[in-house]
Amino acid sequence: MSEPQAGILPAANSDATFLVLLLQNDTESVNTVRRVAAQLPKLTEMLAAKYPDSKLSTTISFGSRAWKILFKGQPYPEELAPFKALRNGDRQAPSTPGDILIHIRSDRKDINFELSRMVMQKLGDSVLLEDEVSGFRYLESRDMTGFVDGTENPEGDNRAAVALIPEGQPLAGGSYIQCQRYIHNLPLWDTCPVHDQEKIIGRTKEDDIEFAAEEKAPTAHIKRVNLKEDGKSLEILRHSMPYGDSMEQGLFFIAYAKTARNFDMMLEQMIHADGHGHYDHLMDFTQAVTGNAYFAPSTEFLASLS
C-alpha cells in the first residue's frame, strides 16, 4: 500500500514554514535535489523523535518544470500543470515562479526553523529561495479577518479520500497541491461592520455558525466555493496558515487534493463573476500575490530516488 508523505493528513499544527524553491537545471543540482528529497522523511523522523512534543512533519512537492527535469522516465502526474493565472478587473490570481515546495509543520516554530535550516544547507546551491513564509495559528484557528478558517475541512478517513490518489491508480498515495499567498487589506476590512463582514463570509464571526442556504448572499465566500458536481461536494484538504507582522498580514493558502480540478473550479468562482455579476466579495479585501501548483509523491517514490 502506498504511503503518503507525513505532512498531508494530520490535523492542524500551531506553526508552519513554507519554502518555495527554484531548481538549478544542471546535473549536480538535479542529483542533490533528488538525494535530499529521498532523505527528507528520515531527517524529519529523526528530529521529530528528538522533540516529540513538536509533532513535526513535512511534505515536499514538485511543480511541472521540476518534475520533468528531476524525474525523467518516471510516471508524470496527469493533472500537474503550471498554476493557471486568472484575472477579472481588479481581481486576480497570478501565476508566479516555484519549482519545489517544502511544507514544514509542527507545534514549535523553533523546530520548524531547525529543520528548514538543515534542509537548505543540504540543498546548497542546487536551488534558489524564491519565497519563505512562516505561518502561525491565530487566536482560535482564525484567519486574520477574524473568522474561523478551514471549517469545511474533511474529517477522519475522509481526509485521505479527499487528499490522496487512491490505490490502483498511477502515483497512488500522492496529492496535488495548489497554494497562493494572499495579502489582506485589514484597514479596509476593519471599516466594515461585523454584520457586513458576516454577509461577505456567509457565517457568523464570533460563534462560527454557517448561515442557512436561503440566508447566504450569492456573493458570500462559502457560497462561491462550496461546489457540487453530480450531487457530490467538491472537496479539498486545506492547511492554510495566517502570516504577517506589523506591516503586512495575510494568508498562505494551501490545499491538498487527489485532483487539481476541485481547486481550479473554486478559484474560478471566486475571481470570475457569474451571469448576474456575482463574485466572491471577499476578493475586495484581499489580493493574491503568488500562485503555484505542485504534486507531492508518495514516500515510496521518494525512497526510490536514493
Image (tube, grey):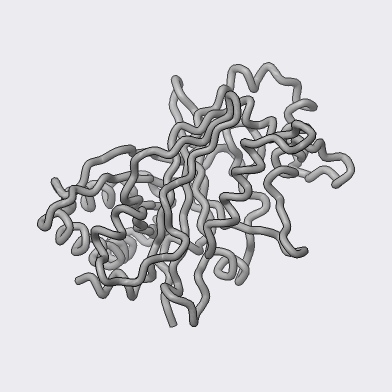
Above or below, comparing residue 306 to residue 213 in the picture: below
* Residue 53 in sight here: no
Quarter of the image holding residue 148? top right
Give the image location of residue 171, x and y in percent. 41, 73
What's the residue at 36%, 53% (across, down)? 63
Disc count in the image? 0
Q: Is residue 80 above or below residue 250?
A: below
Q: Is residue 16 left or right of residue 157?
A: left
In depth, the one of 284 and 93 nearer the eye is: 93
Q: Quadrant of residue 70?
A: bottom left
Q: Residue furthest front?
A: 275
Instruction: Judge from the rendering whether residue 169 lies leftward or rightward of residue 266; answer left or right.
Output: left
Question: Looking at the image, which residue sits at the far left?
Answer: 28
Instruction: Please give the name of the residue rendered at 44% of the width and 26% of the height, measured from the top-left corner.
Output: 245
Coordinates of residue 92 in the picture (x, y in percent): 54, 31
Asked whether residue 79 is in view, the answer is yes
The location of residue 47, given as percent across then percent down, is 28, 60
Nearest the camera: 115 or 239?
A: 239
Residue at (58% x, 29% y) in the render? 91
Residue 302 % position (x, y): 29, 69
* Left or right position of 43 against 237: left
Name the image quarter holding the C terminus. bottom left
The image shows residue 156, relative to residue 88, as above or below, that is below
**Between residues 84 and 246, which one lies in front from this camera angle?**
84
Q: Quadrant of the N terminus?
A: bottom left
Identify the residue at image location x=55%, y=32%. Answer: 87
Q: Is residue 180 left or right of residue 280?
A: left
